[in-house]
Image (spheres, rainbow, N blue to C red):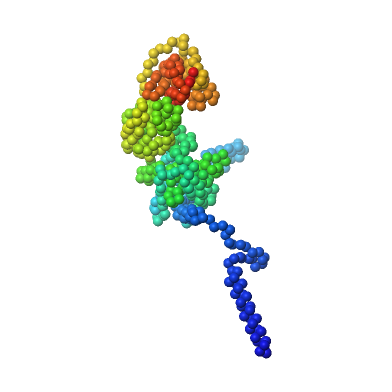
Amino acid sequence: MSRRSILSAIVLIITGMVIGTLLVTGFGGLNHSFADSGVVLSTAPPFNPPDEVTALNQTFTAVSDLVTPTVVAITVKSKVEGGFHRFWPFGDIFPQPPTEEQLQQGSGSGIILTKDGYILTNRHVVEGATEDGIKVLLYDSREFKAKLVGDDRNTDIAVIKIDADGLTPASIGNSDDVRVGEWVLAVGNPLGLTSTVTAGIVSAISRNIGILRSKNADGTGIENFIQTDAAINPGNSGGALVNLRGQVIGVNTAIASNTGLYMGYGFAVPINLAKVVANAIIKEGKFVRGYIGIRITDLDAKKAKALGMDRYKGVLVDEVQPEGAGKEAGVKVGDAIVEVDGKPVMSANELQARVGMHHPGEVVRLKIFRDGKYFEIDVKLKGRSESGESVDVDESVDSGSEDMADSRSTLTFEKAGFSVRALDDQARKAFNRTTGVLVTHVKQYSPAWENNLRQGVVIFEARKGGTTTKIDKPSDLKKVLAGLKEGESVLLRVQTPNGDTTFIPIEGPAM
C-alpha cells in the first residue's frame, strides 16, 4: 500500500472518531428516540414550579411514606340473616338441601396504635364478625387473624388485636388544634384498593350528620365529626385522617352521598375522642361514659336574645333528669351553657363530645348564663341510668280548674302564625299534665314554623330575660306575646307528644 493511501485511511478514521464524539457529547441527554421508529421524545420540563409548590409536594410524599405503613387493611366475615334456604319453595316436592351458614365479607381500614398489635378502627367495620372472622393485612403484606378487644356504639369506635410485635404505630395528633382550611390526607383501603392516599382540606369541624343517632334508638350517639373533602369511599372506614405533620387527627368514618360513593363530603371521628375510648377499651374492654343528665339543643341568636345574652353560641338546657348529676350540681331548665372546662362550646354535639370523654366520678366545670349573669359550677358526672331514658323535671304547677266554656275557644297569633286552645280532658290525659295550651295550627313558612313550632305540642311556660311565666290557659300566653315589640323575642317551653320538652323562640310582634 502506498504512503498516500495509508495517510488517507488515517484521516478517515480520525474524522469518524471526531464526528462520533460530537454526536455523543453534543446531543446526548436532550432527546431520546425509538431505534425502530425514529420518533424523538422531549424530556425537558416545560415549567419549573416555585419552591413553595415543590416543598408542598415533597411534604405530601414524605407524609404518605411515613403514614401508609401505620394503616392496615381489614377484612371481616359476618353472618347473613336468613339466606337462600329461608325462601326454599319446593318443600312439598323435593327435600330442602342441607342448611349451610350464609356469610358475607366486608372490608375496612385500621390504625396501628401500639407496637404489640392494638389497632383502632370503626365499630361498624367489625360489627357482627364471626369467630376468627377478622383478618388484618399489613403494609408489608403480612396477614394476621385479629380478635375484637371491645367497641363503643356511641362513637362507632372499636379496638382489635393481632399477635404481632415490632409494628410501627401511628403518631397521634391533637384534634382540638384542627382548623378549617388546613391540608389533610386520608389514608386507607377504599373499594379494595390497598394503601390509598387522597388529599383535601378540612371543610368543617363539629359536624353532626345524624348517622349515629339514627342507629342508636336512645339518641346517645356522639357526633362531632371533622368534615373533609379528601376522597373517602367504602373501605376507608377506620383509616387515618392525618395533618401535614404526619399525625392522625381523625378516624375516617362516614360519607354523605346519594350514590354510596365519594361526592366530596367525608367525616372523621376526632382523634381526641377516639383515643380516650380506645385507651379505656384496651385497659378495661369497654368504655363507661359520664353523663350530666340533661337534654340540650343548640343556642341560636333568637333564643339568646330572648334570654338577654350578649353572645349567640352555646347550648340551651331543655330538660334535667331528676336524679342526674346536673340536677345535683344545680343545673336548671333554661340555663345556657357556654363553656366546658374553660373551652367554649358552640353546639350541643360539641358539648356531648367534650363531656363524653370523661368517666363517671370525674368533674367537669360548666360556665352558665342564667337570669342575666354568668357563673361557673362543678358537675360530678354520673353513669347513665338503667332505663337510659330522659326524665321530665318534677315541677310543681298551679293546677287550678279552668273555665270549661273557654276550653274549646281558640286564640290565634296572626303575625307569629299559630293558634292555641286550652287543654281538654283528652289532651290532659295524653300529655299527663293539667296546665298549658295546645297548639292547634301552625301556618306553613310563618315565623313560628321557621322556628320549629309545630301543631300538636303543648306550651306550658314562657321566658323573657330573667322572667319566667307559667302558661295555664290561652290568656296567659296572650299577655306574654301581646307585649312583644319589633326585635324582641320570648322563649316558649313546649312538650311534645312523646314527653320531651324543648324551647321555641317567638319574635315580636306576634299579634
Name the image quarter holding residue 15. Answer: bottom right
- Left or right: where does residue 257 sit relative to residue 383? right
Name the image quarter holding residue 433. Answer: top left
Q: Position of residue 425 (x, y in %)?
A: 45, 15
The residue under the point 51% across, 49% down is 198
The residue under the point 35% across, 38% down is 342
User: In the image, is residue 252 above or below residue 28?
Assistant: above
User: In the image, is residue 329 above or below residue 123?
Assistant: above
For the residue pair 15 and 178, the one nearer the viewer reads as 15
For the residue pair 433 and 312, the one nearer the viewer reads as 312
**Can residue 29 be spotted in the picture?**
yes
Q: Which residue lies most toward the bottom here?
A: 2
Q: Position of residue 232 (x, y in %)?
A: 52, 45
Quadrant occupied by the N terminus: bottom right
Q: Position of residue 384 (x, y in %)?
A: 37, 33
**Can residue 108 be spotted in the picture?**
no
The residue under the point 51% across, 55% down is 50
The residue under the point 50% across, 53% down is 53
For the residue pair 446 and 138, the one nearer the viewer reads as 446
Q: How many marks?
A: 0
Q: Position of residue 264 (x, y in %)?
A: 54, 43
